[in-house]
Image (tube, rainbow, N blue to C red):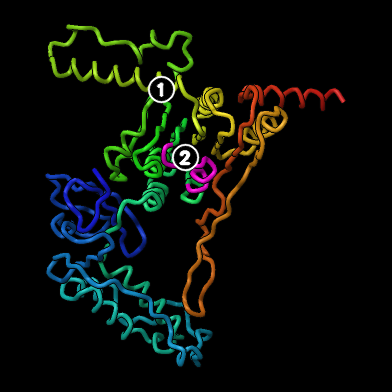
Amino acid sequence: MSFVTGNIKRGSHVILRDSEGSQKVFFLAENCIDLRMGKYGPIPAEAVLNVPYGANLRRSLDGNWERVRRSVDSGVDDDKAEVQETNRFLAQDNSAQSLTPQEVKEMKGSCTGEEIVEALASNSSTFAGKTKFAQEKYLKKKAQKHVQQVAILRPTVMDLCETYLKHFRMKVCGLRFDYLSSILCHADVRTGGRYFLLDCAAGIVAGAMAKQLAGSGRIFRVFRTGCPDKGLTELDLSEAEIGSVRQISIDALQSEDPFSHEWLQAPVEGLDPNQTRQEARKTRHERRKVDFEDLQDQPVDAVVIVAGDDDAELAADAVEIGLQRLVSGGRAVVFGHHLQPLAALQGTWRTSGSFVDVRLEQLFTREYQVLPLRTHPHMSAEAELCGGYILSASKVVGDCPSVSDAAEDQSRKGKRRKTR
């Protein structure tokens, strides 16, 4: 479907983010009744429909989900910036709270989440002695635990990438959003371009590139055994944007006689008694043939390779095939998590004379807490500051070396070292 503007409708995707930062993608199908998010109660689909993206829903005492105004951290006023309280003498023995866990559990049946937070603060013997900063942090922490609230987000490339990274990191090759944006920049993805793509990251790279093309251009996405398109589907792209992504079998590209390959063979007439399925197979075959000839007839503007740890062989084949079809002046971009293979390929590209501006980069990203007088990096042990490497280059002229050539050069260098 096209890019959704205004209120949320049936047939679109949404991302729900709870107060603790967890995210989940949902599809609002025609038969969708409710959405389930973690430990929260069922969220009726009708509560999500007909509200704009960015709205916040909170569960009331009677179990209904109602839209509320977004809470904004107001920080500390200038006249209260200098506080005399200190946390130095507060005991950390869990004896400050007079309410027992059983009493808090009973309150959940008769009080709202905000009332529970207020009760916890008023029954804490150390709350009044905390600094203003510590009080605000205490209230926010308790609200995350006791107030059931979700934010409805649009399925953008950034939010989808972060959601996939939290839920199934290996399926998206550990690809962070900053790396994805850097890949799009290095490959110069633009409207009207032609691109050769290996996307082993659940289709999020193909979706981001299709969104950048805006329906004008071609993305030839190669595959071997399967072609997951989860990210491509959940971005809610238009038909023209989805149509710009064409799937090509890499085995057919490697075949000496591609049109005799199983992927490009015409369906046998009369084999299926169902006429509708027979026509669908025929249409699919014609489209595959047109897409394959389109890739063979004209070069591509960039080659983009995003592969995981288990796809090294597939990535090597894709690099070799893609570079053969790369136009002079085109860009080659390879993402991976291991330094040695990319460093070997970098050396081969530099010595071949066919590439310029050969770079191997590693991005460093750190999230910050931005609050008045409390701006500092997030101090979390699970924060991954570095998450892979990007090898990029521009082709100039001549034959392109393959990954196998890089491995051979590396082995010859090793033999020379041993001989010396």
Closer to us: 372 or 415: 372
**Position of residue 403 measured from the top left corner of the image (x, y, whole percent):** 61, 25
Residue type marked 1? Asp
**Tag 1 residue:** 294
Question: Badge 1, how many Cα within 10 Å: few under 14, some, many 20+?
Answer: few
Which of discs 2 and 1 lies nearer the camera? The answer is 1
Residue located 46% across and 50% down the image: 177
**Element marked by disc 2:** loop
Closer to us: 16 or 392: 392
Whether residue 160 is in magenta: the answer is: no
**Position of residue 372 measured from the top left corner of the image (x, y, whole percent):** 48, 79
**Position of residue 170 measured from the top left corner of the image (x, y, whole percent):** 44, 40
Residue located 28% across and 42% down the image: 238
Cα distance in 3D space between marks 2 and 1: 29 Å
Give the number of the disc on residue 160: none
Whether residue 190 is in magenta: the answer is: yes
Highlighted range, magenta: 181-192
Closer to us: 253 or 63: 253
Give the number of the disc on residue 173: 2
Question: Badge 2, how many Cα within 10 Å: few under 14, some, many 20+?
Answer: many
Q: Is residue 321 left or right of residue 357?
A: left
Residue located 12% across and 44% down the image: 31
Q: Is residue 314 left or right of residue 217?
A: right
Q: Is residue 117 left or right of residue 94?
A: left
Q: Is residue 49 left or right of residue 417?
A: left
Q: Which image quarter is the C terminus in?
A: top right
Residue located 31% across and 72% down the image: 143
Residue type marked 2? Cys
Is 152 rendered above or below residue 386? below
